[in-house]
Image (spheres, rainbow, N blue to C red):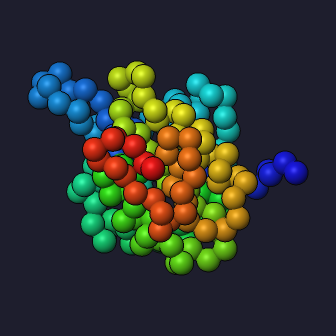
Amino acid sequence: MINRDPLAILVTGGTLDKVHDTFSESLILDGTSRVADILGQGRARVSRIKSLMSIDSLDMDDTHRAKILRAINTAPENRIVVTHGTGTMELTAQALDGNIGKKTVVLTGAMRPWSLGQSDGNFNLGGAVIAARLLPAGVYGVMNGKVFAAQDLHKDVASGRFD
């Protein structure tokens, strides 16, 4: 069965959207999301992309998570992808779990910025879009070609993977 339910993407920042700043010689968030470019490259369509914030997930706190939860609960779409930094993705997934009603929410991100090339971001975002269209209601994470239930989503810092 083909799922044609509307799907939204909520952008929060994270490594996926970072760019190289030549002045500081560091990776920064410049307030611009690369999600539309990634979807365009894959010729994928979603009903809506909304930028909620542009922060590193290590700077995310409960106030930010409450904003994400409000955006999910007030969204007209029942299928939502949230782009998120990998550093605290599991904390956000756990905060959302059990609080989103009958919606399907999938968190995803990248270990390397899309703007630098050779990023896992486009692979992860594509997987998240497919997962959000097919999974039953609940909160999930999609990273490294795997789907994780919210409570099983964990970044292994030593390996740089979600396993």
Q: Residue at x 31, y 71 (%)?
A: 62
Residue 132 occupies quadrant: bottom right
- The spot of residue 79 in percent (x, y) is 65, 59
* Residue 6 located left or right of residue 100: right
- The spot of residue 108 in percent (x, y) is 48, 48
Above or below — where is 14 with respect to 72?
A: above
Above or below — where is 66 with respect to 43?
A: below
* Residue 105 located left or right of residue 153: right
Q: Is residue 7 visible?
A: no
* Residue 137 located left or right of residue 85: right
- The spot of residue 23 in percent (x, y) is 12, 24
Between 4 and 142, the residue placed more toward the observer is 142
Q: Residue at x 66, y 34 (%)?
A: 44
Q: Is residue 57 visible?
A: yes
Q: Residue at x 25, y 26 (%)?
A: 20
Q: Residue at x 67, y 68 (%)?
A: 137
Above or below — where is 162 with respect to 94?
A: above
Residue 94 occupies quadrant: bottom left
In the picture as drawn, the residue positioned furthest to the left comes out as: 24
- The spot of residue 118 in percent (x, y) is 42, 22
Between 98 and 27, the residue placed more toward the observer is 98
* Residue 69 located left or right of residue 49: left
| Tag count | 0
